[in-house]
Image: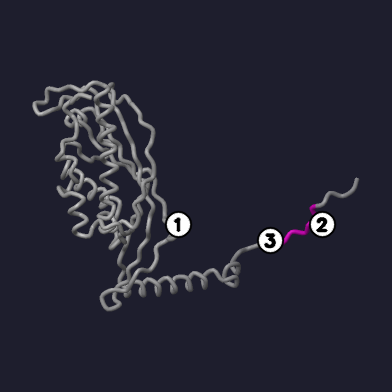
Amino acid sequence: MGDYGYRLSEQQKVYPSGVSSDYLRSTGLIDGSEVVSTGTLTYMQFISIVKYLWEKGTPTVPVLPVSSGKTDTLDKYPAIIGYAMELRKAHTSEPKPRFREHVKNQEYTVFGQRFQNIVSFSIMSKVGTFQGDDYTITRDDVDTAVLCDELIERFEDFMQEYTPVFKAAGASELIYSRRLSDTEMNRESTDVHKRVVTYMVTTEKTFLIPNETIGEISLDIRSWVANVNLQQSPVNQYVSIPYTQVDLNQLSTPNS
């Protein structure tokens, strides 16, 4: 297969942070063992890390919101990677926020909740985009399809190699979900090839509440509930309601 001017260079095939897998193993980031999460990571923080690491090695294929895949954006790059949140739900083991710890001499309480997120990454490339060193090479439909195929494989390798980094940054779990069917779509009268892969990412939201505030709110709620119960007691509820007694025998129709 010939060189269409879009193939990933050897430099781009190096891990996006500019280091090789041998270096990662030498630092202990990849040693064949399971890496345990060392913090909390939100969805947007996860996307920011993916974007930073990927674009360090492949700046010509940026990571953008999937809605950015319009004609004017696709004209600027050989391809883009569009991210999107497909689904978010509470983790099965944590359907509601739970206590995490007390901090600062028991002055504050930390609560947290984990979420399972299905995140999609879509490789999109427009047929006929000018590219190459002098931007004079135009890809046809076959070239664009092969480019997307190469990029999606490269992105899957990138996500697999950097899973220990994502976990070290606070992702509790990062699981390959599935690769969706290859598609071609027409956007703004332009043919666009699309390749989609999804991942299940477990993120966590934490929040800090002063214990003094919790105590004050609890006291206010108990006082309010007691006051409401007193006002709605049965003795006071009906004492002032007027009523009329009706003799039903007088309303009955006599036999004719």
Query: Gap between marks 2 and 1, in whole Å?
Result: 64 Å
In the rendered image, which residue does mark 2 sit on?
A: 249
**Residue at far bottom of view:** 105
- Please name the residue shown 26% across and 75% down the image: 104
Q: Mark 2, mark 1: which one is toward the viewer?
A: 1
Residue type marked 3: Thr
Residue 8 horizontal/vertical position (percent): 19, 35
Circle 2 SS class: helix
For the residue carrying disc 3, how many other residues have a C-alpha within 10 Å: few (<14), some (14-19), or many (20+)?
few
For the residue carrying disc 1, how many other residues have a C-alpha within 10 Å: few (<14), some (14-19), or many (20+)?
few
Circle 3 SS class: loop
- Please name the residue shown 11% across and 26% down the image: 135
Query: Does 37 sit above or below residue 160?
Result: below
How are the residues colored? one colour
Q: Is residue 59 magenta?
A: no
Q: Using residue 112 as the reference point, say whether residue 2 is left or right of it.
A: left
In the rendered image, which residue does mark 3 sit on?
A: 244
**Which mark, residue 92?**
1
Quarter of image, res 94:
bottom left
- Please name the residue shown 20% across and 54% down the image: 24
**Which circle's residue, 1 or 3, is located before the other in the chain?**
1
Range of residues picked out in magenta: 245-251
Query: Does 38 sit above or below residue 43?
Result: below
Quarter of image, res 83:
top left
